[in-house]
Amino acid sequence: KLAPGALNFTQSCWVCFATDEDDRTAEWVRPCRCRGSTKWVHQSCLQRWVDEKQRGNSTARVACPQCNAEYLIVFPKLGPVVYVLDLADRLISKACPFAAAGIMVGSIYWTAVTYGAVTVMQVVGHKEGLDVMERADPLFLLIGLPTIPVMLILGKMIRWEDYVLRLWRKYSNKLQILNSIFPGIGCPVPRIPAEASPLADHVSATRILCGALVFPTIATIVGKLMFSSVNSNLQRTILGGIAFVAIKGAFKVYFKQQQYLRQAHRKILNFPETEEA
């Protein structure tokens, strides 16, 4: 039988719930301010619990889940070589995110520079473009070439077709030429349909990016097809770009207007009644 008061000195691990009588060789530790049943814990159990909380980060701080007291964790002293290696490892870990961001920004920048150079040779001509870039100031090229894709994307974001469409809807009934080309275009609509915002489309950003970057190639092709008599590559490409934007914009305005009229004349039918058996 146990002596009176012996249970008061029995140590119980709050991790595995074993007592000092279960394993008399186990090392015990009192790591926090807790009292009672959560006062003592096996050194090995607490080590495993700390490993789970740190998740491989040995410098992470761990506190008691009951009293929130931070555990005092000490390590053996490192030798000079190991200390230098550990310091270098920590410095590299902290510098890697900034290095990765710099590499990403640099990659985007040089990609924009390359795209700008290819666009210049495509628009002006291969030989003429190389001559222009060789005579230009290097600083001007480093600043000017990456702005080419940026300006193309910003220009693509200008939705001039929407302004033309508003003017069309406002003055279409006053312009007889539109009524003769598009019969019924100026007729009043039974209701004003709700139109979705252009930014609500999750594909818009992708379409703007792709359309802007492909535009110089399309302008060059259209210029060669429609303005082959023009000798200057630059003038031919500019005319091709203007023609492409105008034709594409006209089709887009017409398509949106037809969708607008289709929504305006939408009707909701009665539910068909079924004959009872």
Image: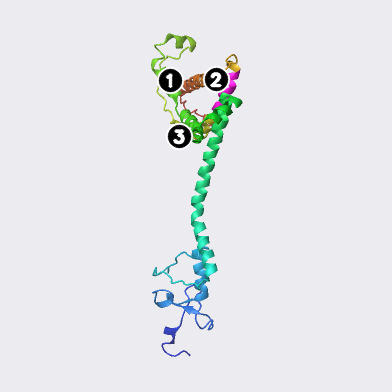
Q: From mark 1 to mark 3, how far is it between C-alphas?
A: 21 Å
Q: Nearer the viewer, residue 51 or 88?
A: 88
Q: Quadrant of residue 194?
A: top left
Q: Nearer the viewer, mark 2 or mark 1?
A: 2
Say which amino acid is labelled 3.
Answer: Ala
Q: Residues within 10 Å of mark 1 (few under 14, many from 20)?
A: some
In the picture provided, is 124 more to the left or to the right than 195? right
Would you say residue 215 sits in the magenta stretch? yes
Q: Tell me: 28 left or right of 130.
A: left
Percent of width and height locating residue 77: 50, 73
**Disc number for residue 240:** 2
| Residue 16 rendering spot, x and y as whole percentages | 51, 74
Is the residue 80 above or below the residue 241 in the image?
A: below
The residue range painted magenta reads 214-224
Q: Name the amino acid type tagged 2.
A: Gly
Precedes in sequence: disc 3 or disc 2: 3
Residue located at (51% from left, 67% from top): 83
- The residue carrying mark 3 is 200
Q: Residues within 10 Å of mark 2 (few under 14, many from 20)?
A: many
> For this rendering, which residue is in front, 123 or 156?
123
Q: Residue at x 55, y 33 (%)?
A: 115
Would you name the residue on which mark 1 appears? 164
- The quarter holding residue 176 reads top left
Q: Nearer the viewer, mark 3 or mark 2?
A: 2
- Secondary structure under tag 3 reads helix
Label pair 2/1, CB-CB below 8 angstroms: no
User: What whole-number distance in Å separates the C-alpha atoms at marks 2 and 1?
Assistant: 21 Å
